[in-house]
């Protein structure tokens, strides 16, 4: 005895198939979105680590001179108290910032704080990389401390007979 396929069974199978396809599409879209987020985040961490490494290679005084001499389109600088802010817009900036190219989708915010009132021997560096993922703003923040280099050679003291006579 042959059984005929009923229209109700056809409708049910189409609904089940459409539901399965819908769930698979949602999973694929979520995976794509997540992979874009991971890619952007890894690019931001590469940018941040390159800038920090290139800053640490320079001498303490060269960092300030480098920033003071920069005057390109796409860079804004401001000084508030003992904190210097530098913002680099990758969309407008075509040069390298501390030896690192900034892609057009990224904005790098550098904050340099001079620690210590009498002597300038320590700078606190906070680097924030902002980027968009699926029209949502994301950011990565890295901070470090840069210390003034030790002086290898000091001036030799001049000891005269007058100095020794007082002893």
Image: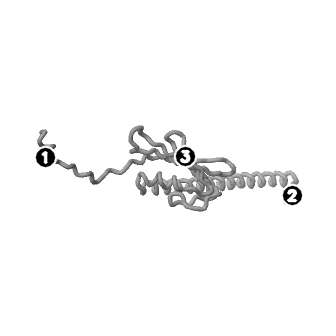
For mark 2, what is the residue? 4
User: SS at mark 2?
Assistant: loop
Expressed as whole percent of the image width and height from the top left, the position of residue 147 reads: 39, 47
Q: Image point 41% across, 54% down: which residue?
A: 59
Give neighbour class at mark 3: few <14, some 14-19, many 20+ (Cα, 10 Å): some
Expressed as whole percent of the image width and height from the top left, the position of residue 20 reads: 73, 53
For mark 1, what is the residue? 161
Upstream in sequence: badge 3 or badge 2: 2
Which of the two residues, 102 or 43, is positioned nearer the viewer here? Answer: 102
Q: Quadrant of residue 123?
A: top left
Q: Relative to residue 59, is residue 83 depicted above or below?
A: above
Expressed as whole percent of the image width and height from the top left, the position of residue 153 reads: 27, 54
Label pair 1/3, CB-CB below 8 angstroms: no
Q: Image point 51% across, 52% down: which residue?
A: 68
Q: Alpha carbon of mark 1 to alpha carbon of mark 3: how far?
A: 53 Å
Q: Relative to residue 70, is residue 128 depicted above or below?
A: above
For mark 3, what is the residue? 85
User: SS at mark 3?
Assistant: strand
Upstream in sequence: badge 1 or badge 3: 3
Expressed as whole percent of the image width and height from the top left, the position of residue 5 reads: 85, 57
Which of the two residues, 141 or 97, is positioned nearer the viewer here? Answer: 97
Q: Quadrant of residue 21?
A: bottom right
């Amino acid at each position: 005895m042959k059984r005929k396929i009923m229209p109700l069974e056809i409708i049910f199978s189409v609904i089940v198939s459409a539901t399965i396809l819908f769930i698979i599409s949602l999973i694929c879209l979520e995976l794509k979105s997540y992979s874009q987020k991971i890619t952007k985040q890894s690019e931001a961490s590469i940018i941040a680590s390159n800038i920090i490494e290139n800053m640490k290679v320079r001498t303490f005084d060269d960092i300030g001179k480098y920033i003071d001499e920069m005057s390109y389109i796409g860079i804004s600088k401001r000084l508030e108290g003992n904190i210097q802010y530098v913002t680099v817009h990758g969309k407008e900036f075509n040069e390298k910032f501390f030896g690192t190219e900034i892609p057009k989708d990224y904005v790098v915010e550098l904050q340099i704080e001079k620690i210590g009132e009498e002597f300038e021997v320590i700078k606190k560096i906070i680097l924030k990389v902002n980027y968009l993922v699926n029209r949502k703003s994301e950011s990565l923040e890295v901070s470090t401390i840069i210390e003034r280099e030790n002086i290898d050679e000091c001036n030799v003291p001049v000891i005269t007979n007058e100095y020794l006579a007082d002893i």
